[in-house]
Amino acid sequence: MDVKKPHERVLCVGPLLPALRALQEAIQRQGYEVLLAFTADHAVAVSISNPCDAVIVDAELIRAEGVTLAETLKLVRPEIPVLLLDHREDQSRRESLPKGVDAAVDGRSHGAVLAWLAAIFEQKHGWG
């Protein structure tokens, strides 16, 4: 007997619409609802008006006026998991995370993003 998983909402934040749309489609195929934001301010506004269960932030937008976007989002919802998409070959940013970021993956890999989402929601709901 299949157990229906709770509906999860994911906020994806990044400056490039084509990249966000591709990520949105990959995540939606897994059954998650996806909201998009294109700037740090837009991401905060969306997260206030539409509570999300996870946030995925492109590394290009992680800093906003000296405070990380992740820190600001966690002021709204301290428990929200935040994933950093890092598109660089050099993995140094993935090893030393900005404040407020819970994990980082290679932003070129939708599989890594989907694996992270599955892991955090399995942990949250005990689906394992």
Image (spheres, rainbow, N blue to C red):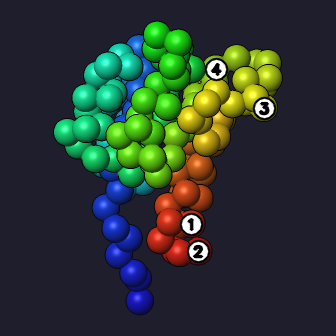
- The residue lying toward the viewer, choosing from 13 and 48, is 48
Q: Is residue 77 above or below residue 31?
A: above
Q: Amino acid at mark 2?
A: Gly
Disc 3 vs disc 2: which is toward the camera? 3
Q: Nearer the viewer, residue 81 or 68?
A: 68
Can the viewer see residue 29? Answer: no
Residue 29 location (% of width, % of height): 39, 49
The residues tagged by marks 3 and 2 sit, at their Cα atoms, a distance apart of 26 Å
For marks 3 and 2, the one nearer the N-term is 3
Give the residue number, with chain letter if any, for mark 1. 123
How many angstroms separate mark 2 from mark 1 (CA)? 7 Å
Which residue does the numbered mark 3 point to in the structure image? 95
Report the residue marked by disc 2. Answer: 128
**Callout 4: SS:** loop
Q: Quadrant of the C terminus?
A: bottom right
Q: Which residue is mark 4?
A: 87
Label whose residue precedes the other's in the sequence (3 or 1): 3
